Amino acid sequence: MSIYDVFVINRAGSLIYDYSTKTEIPKIEKTFSFPLDLVLEVIDQKAVVVFGARDRIQLRYSVSAVNSRPVRQCRFTVVTEDGSETEHNVMEFLGNAANFPVDLSFSPPTVTQNEKIILSSTFHSLFAIAAQLSPMPKSSGIEVLETNQFRLHCFQSVTGVKFVVVASLNANQNLDALLRKIYELYADFALKNPFYSIDMPIRCERFDDAMVALLSKADSTAPLLTRMADFLSKIPNQLGYMVISNGAVTKSSGDLANKESIVPHILRMIQLGGVSAASLPEPQCNLINVTFADYFLSISYSGQAIYVVKRKR
């Protein structure tokens, strides 16, 4: 999945809706000898790595199993030879050299509901600070926040409600358009609901169903666009390529990198060709070649997707 979380934050900075994709949490298993070269501390009743990250075991990862026995609240049970079960504390067990070598399983940290509420309030404050510090008048605040692990996109409505999407770095969707679509769903299924009070948590079943359908559809298009971008990059004599989805550039390279200004001209070419890209059924694909002195553009379009390749003549 390329979309991790969706948050809706009200005007006061409170979290009123959140959606998280249900993904398998990968576990890391490794055999350790004494002494343990990881520093563990008990945090929220979990044995958490606080120093010595190594072999894909990162900081804040917690011990989820000891010798294949699941750990709950920093404790696990061991079946003895007579069939009885003995409970052990993880920290005490790992402090005894007689218990080594030991197989440990680690799980990455998960965000609790309380942590989501705190993060939403913190982002609301950072958004306000960024808008005040911006040299531009009437700044829109934080729109994109990128880290080495994810990318955060934010859209604030005219009433001050923030819509936030957290996605992977390789997400190919037009997330700005997705945020505005989420805003439309909020207006249709929450604000128009006579039983919903503004700025209160959203508890609307139809809104939940519409969100699931929208995000499932958005994520389903990502693998196709990624495969098409890989294919375009391997075309012989190509100088650059661009992938356009729903009227916005999702990926570009070479001579067409950062050339969003040509998108209106490409859309105009398609319209002059007699067919609107938005009206095409998905299986149908059309091709337009535009020739210049030293190169030509191959424009193929199907449904909402448009693929542009610049090639040598």
Image: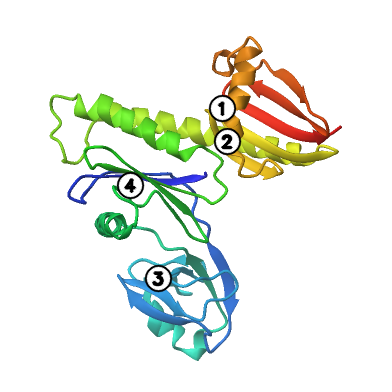
The numbered mark at residue 140 is 4
Q: Residue at x 74, y 37 (%)?
A: 232
Q: Do the residues bearing badges 4 and 2 touch, measured as CB atoms within 8 Å? A: no
* Quadrant (top left/top right/bottom left/bottom right) for the C terminus: top right
Q: Residue at x 58, y 72 (%)?
A: 30
Q: Do the residues bearing badges 1 and 2 touch, measured as CB atoms within 8 Å? A: yes
Of the numbered discs 3 and 4, the one sitting upstream in the chain is 3
Query: Relative to 59, is 297 above or below?
Result: above
SS at mark 2 in the image: helix
Of the numbered discs 1 and 3, the one sitting upstream in the chain is 3
Q: Residue at x 58, y 14 (%)?
A: 276
Of the numbered discs 1 and 4, the one sitting upstream in the chain is 4
The numbered mark at residue 264 is 1
Determine crowd level at label 1: few under 14, some 14-19, many 20+ residues with C-alpha closer than 10 A: few
Give the residue at mark 3: 77
Look at discs 4 and 2 and give the one toward the viewer: 2
Q: Quadrant of residue 198?
A: top left
C-alpha separation, residue under disc 1 versus residue under disc 3? 65 Å
SS at mark 3 in the image: strand
Query: Relative to 274, is 241 above or below?
Result: below
C-alpha separation, residue under disc 1 versus residue under disc 4? 24 Å
* Viewer-nearest residue: 42 or 134: 134
SS at mark 1 in the image: helix
The residue under label 2 is which amino acid type? Answer: Ser
Determine crowd level at label 3: few under 14, some 14-19, many 20+ residues with C-alpha closer than 10 A: some
